[in-house]
Image (tube, grey):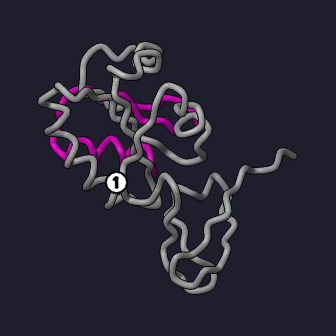
Amino acid sequence: MMQEKSIIIVCSECSTKNRIPGNRLGDRPKCGKCGAYLAFYGYSGNPVDITDRSFEEEVLSFPGPVLVDCWAPWCGPCHMVAPILNDLASEYAGRLKIAKLNVDENPETASRYDTRSIPTMLIFKGGKLVERIVGALPKKRIEQYILSVIK
């Protein structure tokens, strides 16, 4: 039987080490000792910047769901979506990782996923692309896509 990929998360409240199976990361894990929600890299409540070089590790190899925001500094609608994604990163900490990919600086990944207009948000689960969201949508609509994936 293949071993399930797991991660060790140290509780920020009581410093207990918790082993969380990869398939349970999206369940918003709690500390086994004190019951506090566990925050860890990628689920810390803040979007992470990624590049062509880090895409494999940060997105495809990540055991939980990941929303990748494909954006550019000159894009007005991208700037409109950014605070929404910051809010969602905080609200879904422990259940969803949000990553930001500057398409001007990382054309390889943008091309690989056929990103023709921005903002484009790509949602991955288990290393596979499961949703594509194009355009500056309202928070509630983006949240509907997220909820369809993290359930």
Q: Give the structural element (helix, strand or loop) at label 1.
A: helix
The quadrant where residue 32 appears = bottom right
Give whichever of 44, 140 is nearer the camera. 44
Badge 1: few (under 14), some or many (20 or more) residues near its Cα, within 10 Å?
many
- Which residue does the numbered mark 1 point to in the structure image? 89
Q: Is residue 100 magenta?
A: no
Residue that appears at 19% across and 40% down: 81
Q: Which stretch did the figure color magenta?
A: 122-151
**Left or right: 70 as drawn, with respect to 56:** left
Relative to 107, is 87 on the left or the right?
Answer: left
Give the percent coordinates (x, y) of residue 136: 17, 33
Where residue 104 appears, as percent x and y from the top left, is 32, 20
Residue 131 covered by magenta stretch? yes
Give the residue displayed 46% in from the left and 61% down from the top.
94
Relative to 116, residue 2 above or below: below
Q: Position of residue 16 (x, y in %)?
A: 64, 79
Q: Position of residue 24 (x, y in %)?
A: 60, 58
Q: Quick one: which residue is furthest to the right in this view?
A: 1
